[in-house]
Amino acid sequence: MYGTVYLVGAGPGDPELLTVKANRLLDDADVVLHDALASDEIVESADAAEIRDVGKRSGGERTTQEEINCLMVRKAKEGKDVIRLKGGDPTVFGRGGEEAQHLAAEGIDFEFVPGVTSAIAGPGVAGIPVTHRDHASSLTVVTGHEDPTKDESALNWDALAANVRAGGTLVVLMGVGRLPDNVAALRASGLAPDTPVAMVEKATRDAEFSVTGTLDSIVSRADEVGIEPPAVTVVGDVVSVREQVVECLQETPAAQFAAPADTAVSERGVER
């Protein structure tokens, strides 16, 4: 009898944001195949006999999607219950849909277990609501790192810029490396240079770090303070809400915030 594969969202990193169901499954699974964005604390809490890192790391060691698909099927056909553990939510740029299709084609039972997506959690923990009655009535989430084998971008930057101009919020995931290109595309599509922008690195984790600026300044600001993946980029008027709430915001104990653009910064979050 085949086992079941659970496509589980691990959330943005804080173990307390893991769902009750995901936590229970981690206690009961035979095999855990986790990606690079699942936090160490969550992975180490698993009670499975076999725990394997199958993360895809840019420029480094890489487990191909084909290898992951084969592993899930092989372990399930051995009668083992498998957790495919992904940072955030498995269906938000997590290839959960592709993996579900592969499992179904192989006759393997599977279940989606939703997780808290960083597209919402990242801005939220930094004091930036992705929607707000006075600032944004729509939310668009896009990948900032499209499949490099595509002949052309599937993103309509003109439409994205128009939506932000109309009062919407744009959230870009996995876009640190292509930040200059993405900003240039929004500028070329007519989005105002003074549009508020924020980046939140390692949201909900001890190393959480935020930087704010504008479309005109965010690339230099990110370079200045050394923003690194994983980070979420937020574009739109909702970013301004942070300034109004930050004094009372209870952030991750080690969370830091880069100084305003007109303040010199010698180290992350340290004004001089």
Image (cartoon, rainbow, N blue to C red):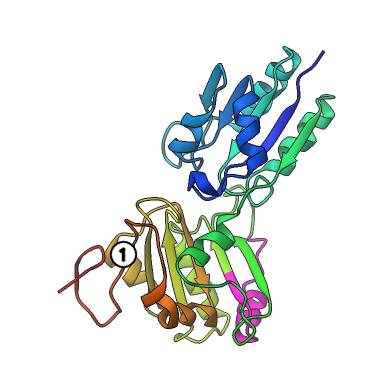
Q: Position of residue 175 (x, y in %)?
A: 49, 59
Q: Is residue 156 magenta?
A: yes
Residue drawn at (80%, 25%), measured in percent from left and top? Answer: 108
- Residue 214 appears anywhere in the view: no
Q: Residues within 10 Å of mark 1 (few under 14, many from 20)?
A: few
Residue 170 in which image quadrant = bottom right
In the image, 271 versus 99, the foreground residue is 271
Q: Does residue 6 appear to the left or right of 164 in the view shown?
A: right
**Residue 223: % across, % down:** 31, 64
> Vertical placement of 47 versus 229: above or below?
above
Q: Is any atom of residue 40 visible in this view?
A: yes
Which residue in the rendered view is the most extreme toward the left? Answer: 272
* Label total for image: 1
Is residue 30 rendered to the left or right of residue 226? right
Residue denoted by label 1: 223
In the displayed structure, 227 sits above or below 258; it is above
For the magenta stretch, what is the residue range? Answer: 153-170
Amino acid under disc 1: Asp
Which quadrant of the figure contains the N terminus?
top right
Could you tell me which residue is drawn at 65 percent across and 52 percent down?
Answer: 92
Magenta span contains residue 206: no
Q: Is residue 131 left or right of residue 99?
A: left
- 170 or 157: which is nearer to us? 170
Residue 197: x %, y % from top left: 46, 75
Question: Where the C terminus falls, by quadrant?
Answer: bottom left
The answer to which image quadrant residue 172 occupies is bottom right
- Residue 227 appears at what percent x and percent y? 35, 59
> In percent of the image, x 54 and y 83: which residue is there?
191
